[in-house]
Amino acid sequence: MRGLVTFAGRPPVQLGTEIDWTANPHGNRSWALNLHTLRWLGRLVAEYERSGERSCLDRAAAVADHWMRANPRGGAGVSPWAWAEHAIALRAPALVCLSEHVHTPRLWDSLAEHGELLADPGLYRPGHNHGLDQDIALLVVACRLGRARWRDLAVRRMTASAELAIDAQGALHEQAPRYGLYVHRRLGVALRAIRESGAEVPERLVARRRALEAYVAHATQPDGRLVPIGDSPADARADGFPHDGPVVRVFGGGYVFGRSAWDDPESAYYSIRFGPGRRLHGHEDHLGVTYFAGGRPILVEAGFHSYERTGYADWTRSPEAHNVPIPTGATFRPGTATRLLDARVGPGHQSFELADDAYGVRRTRRVFVTHGSGMMAVHDRVASGTLRSLWHFDPGLKVLSRGDGAVELGDDTGFRVTLLQFPAEGQTVRPALISTGYLRTAESVTVLSPEAPGVLTTVIPHTRHGSGTSARSS
């Protein structure tokens, strides 16, 4: 009501009454997009519906009218974010919400223009979360304007798009569990909108949403946070997803997720990446692993920082930001697929073998996890030449001691973890910057293995309760 808004986790901004729609005070792409989605306008309409406070509706109507007058499509000086395809998709439902109470020719004409753009196949993003938002927007605009053709198109596209985005096992091809959570929530909105429109709900759409639940559940660490793979912030939570069946699941789309038990915050948990080359919200993380034990993350990845075009954001997507083996002196080939050669899953231990030629030479990784001793062992080798493997530790872990290929780390709760490597000579311990959430970072410890044709690395946690194998005895 006072023109004060907060977008994308940035500090509040005073927009004023005569809003500058080209403003981007934080120089942030997400902030600029959010300004033009007008979802914040929808909150004023919701408050009017809740309280009957007419001033809220009048303010919403004034903001929308100002936006429509100031942002003609193709107009000189109009922000490129005004008519970006995702801004259109997220703004249209807010305008539909307003049109429940405000009836002006300009608003109705704008809804029709939004509908035409949403229905345009040249602007549509099938198999993408933006495409789903476009379908939801087209459906609600169609219902407001009485366009049955648009409604039916939206429902058809939703179903076909979901089957592109989510495979039969439930893995999302956008390659980031955080987007699995987003798509699941938006599919819930879509299904409700279909029912309210009077159209028949496609069972195929329901089935893909249900399959997606398994992917999100398995991608959730014992602390309730999503494993930070791809563009998944390290602080994203996904509590409450149904789960049953095996504690280890291999998704053909490129993931191994394993844990020692469900619903135990102290249980061990790991992830391994393979599969198709990087796309959409994925990172160059193939052969990468994460590890969680004793109630806390141990091996982490650089994670998601932002959508900003910065050197650091670019680095978070690179192989070096992940726990991977890197052949020395070789050139990385982006988008290379990785094969899962072998998977052996037992109740107390599991082993996996993966390989690719992302550096023009075959590199192979074998991962062995045993839950009895809480140990992960990884053997990396390269067909010719040498390699070095990278290991990024959670920022809460600090180096306590090192020597002879062993690095012991711990936190202030008494938790300890030891990394052992063979060969030992040439191991490097250095600082790194890990993303702990959107636009947030923290310094962490990275261990770089010795250079060799093959490297064996073991990670042994010693929990606060005394379980785990000692570094010396192992």
Image (cartoon, rainbow, N blue to C red):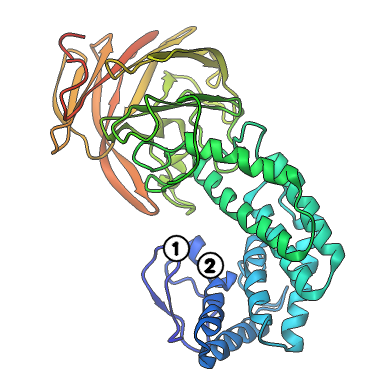
Label count reads: 2
What whole-number distance in Å separates the C-alpha atoms at marks 2 and 1? 8 Å
Q: Which mark is residue 34?
A: 2
Q: Position of residue 471 (x, y in %)?
A: 18, 14
359 lies left or right of 187: left
Q: Position of residue 262 (x, y in %)?
A: 40, 31
338 lies left or right of 444: right
Q: Position of residue 429 (x, y in %)?
A: 23, 26
Which is more toward the observer, 285 or 198? 198
Which is more toward the observer, 62 or 316? 62
Q: Residue at x 72, y 40 (%)?
A: 163
Residue wearing tag 1: 8
Picture layout, residue 442 above or below residue 273: below
For disc 2, the neighbor class at 10 Å (few under 14, some 14 to 19, many from 20) is many
Q: In the rendered structure, are the residues bearing label 2 and label 1 in contact, judged by CB atoms less than 8 Å apart? A: yes
Q: Residue at x 64, y 86 (%)?
A: 65
